[in-house]
């Protein structure tokens, strides 16, 4: 499982008044009362491009009397990248290949027909896109037996994932874990559709059952929280891709 920086709900007292940015060769450094901020591993909290640095600064400036890192999602993602070592970054790169063999979109409902039709309607466009544009082809089955990925699919996925920088490798790894699908993770990374649509596709079976048997308040809240986290991945990706640098 991919670990994100600062997962504890514990808050600390705000110890600074002013937040600013200082540009240096490697990017924009976050300054708290003119002192360089650090990551949990004591690395400089430095971002690039400028749009990402501005968002980080805004999260720090937006804290009240206490600092709540759980309300600073982009800062936590950046810290995770900055503190990533060779082992953890390799794990991120390898995560998609761990999901492709049991990809959510491979396993289709045996019944009822309404769910089968819904899966075809929602999931097939992702499968067709991945096969055509990325060379990643999924087989489909109604059996629960794991299907090994096609050799050419595994090769294409490994090549795509290994070429990613650490930040995008982290985004893809987290998206795979949150959706249970390498294809849906790639759909988020490649901008095939919105975070909301990708997330909804990954919970298709769950929402189908709710429509038939009724909703559960706790499940709805849990899914809403997960969607917020998933949308933060898309936000982080957009900031990384900003040309305002």
Image (cartoon, grey):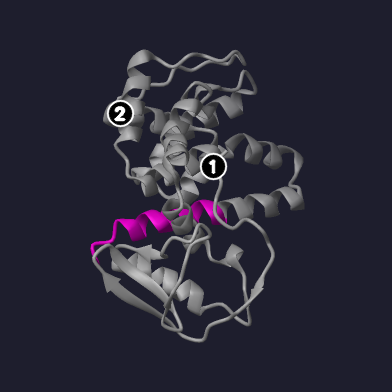
**Nearer the N terminus, badge 1 or badge 2?**
1
Quarter of the image where the C terminus is located? bottom left
Q: Position of residue 214 (x, y in %)?
A: 75, 44
Categorize mark 2 by other alpha carbons within 10 Å: few (<14), some (14-19), many (20+).
Answer: few
Describe the element under mark 1 as helix, strand or loop.
Answer: loop
Q: Is residue 230 magenta?
A: yes
Circles 1, 2 touching at the beta carbon (< 8 Å): no
Quarter of the image where the N terminus is located? top right
Residue at point 31%, 62% (across, down): 48
Residue carrying label 2: 159
Q: Position of residue 70 (x, y in %)?
A: 60, 63
Using residue 165 as the reference point, say whether residue 34 is left or right of it. Answer: right
For the record, the magenta segment spans 228-245
Residue carrying label 1: 2
Residue at point 58%, 81% (across, down): 15
Residue at point 36%, 14% (across, down): 151
Report which quarter residue 134 is drawn in. top left
Q: Is residue 187 magenta?
A: no
Report which quarter residue 22 is drawn in. bottom left
Q: CA distance from mark 1 to mark 2?
A: 20 Å
């Amino acid at each position: 499982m991919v670990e994100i920086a600062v997962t504890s709900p514990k808050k600390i007292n705000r110890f600074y008044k002013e937040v600013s940015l200082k540009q240096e060769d490697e990017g924009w450094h976050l300054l708290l009362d003119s002192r360089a901020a650090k990551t949990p591993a004591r690395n400089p909290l430095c971002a690039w491009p400028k749009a990402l640095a501005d968002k980080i600064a805004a999260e720090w400036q937006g804290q009240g009397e206490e600092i709540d890192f759980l309300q600073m999602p982009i800062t936590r993602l950046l810290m995770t990248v900055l503190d990533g070592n060779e082992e953890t970054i390799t794990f991120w790169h390898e995560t998609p290949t761990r999901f492709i063999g049991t990809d959510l979109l491979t396993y289709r409902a045996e019944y009822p027909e309404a769910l089968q039709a819904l899966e075809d309607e929602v999931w097939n466009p992702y499968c067709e896109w991945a096969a055509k544009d990325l060379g990643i082809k999924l087989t489909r089955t109604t059996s629960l037996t794991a299907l090994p990925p096609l050799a050419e699919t595994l090769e294409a996925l490994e090549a795509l994932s290994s070429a990613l920088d650490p930040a995008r490798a982290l985004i893809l790894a987290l998206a795979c874990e949150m959706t249970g699908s390498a294809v849906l993770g790639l759909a988020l990374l490649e901008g095939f559709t919105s975070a909301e649509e990708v997330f909804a596709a990954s919970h298709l079976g769950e929402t189908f059952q709710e429509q038939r048997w009724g909703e559960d308040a706790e499940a709805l809240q849990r899914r809403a929280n997960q969607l917020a986290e998933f949308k933060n991945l898309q936000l982080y990706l957009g900031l990384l891709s900003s040309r305002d640098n």
